[in-house]
Amino acid sequence: MAVNGESLTFWDHLEELRRSIFRVLAVFVCLTVCLFFFKNFLFDKVVLAPASSDFFLYRMLGVDFSLNLVNLEVSAQFLIHMKVTFICSLILCVPYLIYEIWRFILPALYDNEKKSIRGAFAFASVLFYIGLATAYCVIFPFMLNFFASYQVSPDVPNNFSLSSYISMFTSTMLAFGLVFEFPAVIAALSSLGVVSREVLKQYRKHAFVVILVLSAVITPSGDPFTMMVVCLPLYLLYEVSIMICRNKVEQPEE
């Protein structure tokens, strides 16, 4: 690897990596401190909004749904505040994290790779937030509605703890944010000549089975409707990946 025409040693790489990690941590800490003081907005307007009947999706569908959450542990609310603050800071930090990764690997790329890889990295940030929006606006409300209305017996009412709600919320958000990065990863691998459109088409059936399994993992209820809600955007991502992938593997030129 070389920077400005000068070759870097192994220790130079480590030093550059250390600087990148330090910059990312600095941005993350600043975002965490700022978000910590916006607790009311963060929880009332964002995190707990899908548990309220005022949530826009319920109003659009005419669904009368609300969820009463309870706290069962003494320190849970403070720890949840910290956890949600950290995760939201990480989510906001993703574009800068992707930029630092791009900045670190840039010197190792060929000239003809830099433009296409740059586009894939920029695309990654957009896809991450599209995944979050899909999970927040559609997937999580449907999952929450299903679990809240499901009962093994009318004699056993559903009382949900704040901890279980937050756990389901954060895991769903992060899972979809990461899964939606798949087209960006495929675009980068295609630019590097690792995968081609023909390969993705050849394994389309296998991918569909994997997507079904992944949907079942994300929606452990096994409800067919909820699984389909999860499966559909994931399969569409695979088709998008085929569309943006190169027709054939091309070897990079020095």
Image (tube, grey):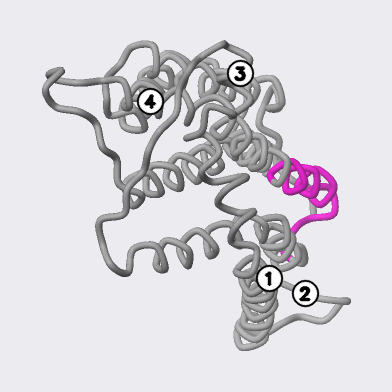
Judged from the image, the secondary structure of the residue bearing numbered disc 2 is: strand
Q: Relative to 32, does residue 114 appear above or below in the rendering? A: above
Give the residue at mark 2.
2
Q: Is residue 114 magenta?
A: yes
Amino acid under disc 3: Arg
> What's the distance in space between the residues labelled 1 and 3, CA to CA?
32 Å
Give the residue at mark 3.
59
> What's the distance in space between the residues labelled 1 and 2, CA to CA?
38 Å
Q: Relative to 169, does residue 75 appear above or below in the rendering? A: below
> What's the distance in space between the residues labelled 4 and 1, CA to CA?
35 Å
Give the residue at mark 4.
215
Q: Residues within 10 Å of mark 1 (few under 14, many from 20)?
A: few
> What's the distance in space between the residues labelled 4 and 2, CA to CA?
43 Å
Q: In the rendered view, does 139 fall on the left or right side of 59?
A: left
Disc on the earlier residue, 4 or 3: 3
What segment carries the magenta color? 108-124
Q: Position of residue 254 (x, y in %)?
A: 80, 54
Q: Residues within 10 Å of mark 4 (few under 14, many from 20)?
A: many
- Camera-near label (4 vs 1) is 1
Q: Are marks 4 and 2 in contact (CB under 8 Å)?
A: no
Q: The N terminus is located in which quarter?
A: bottom right
| Residue shown at 35% from the left, 21% from the top | 146
Q: Relative to 244, does residue 94 appear above or below in the rendering? A: below
Disc on the earlier residue, 4 or 2: 2
Disc on the earlier residue, 4 or 1: 1
| Residue shown at 54% from the left, 33% from the top | 135
Judged from the image, the secondary structure of the residue bearing numbered disc 3 is: helix
Judged from the image, the secondary structure of the residue bearing numbered disc 4 is: helix
Point out which mark residue 34 bears: 1
Prevalent SS, magenta region: helix
Q: Residues within 10 Å of mark 3 (few under 14, many from 20)?
A: few
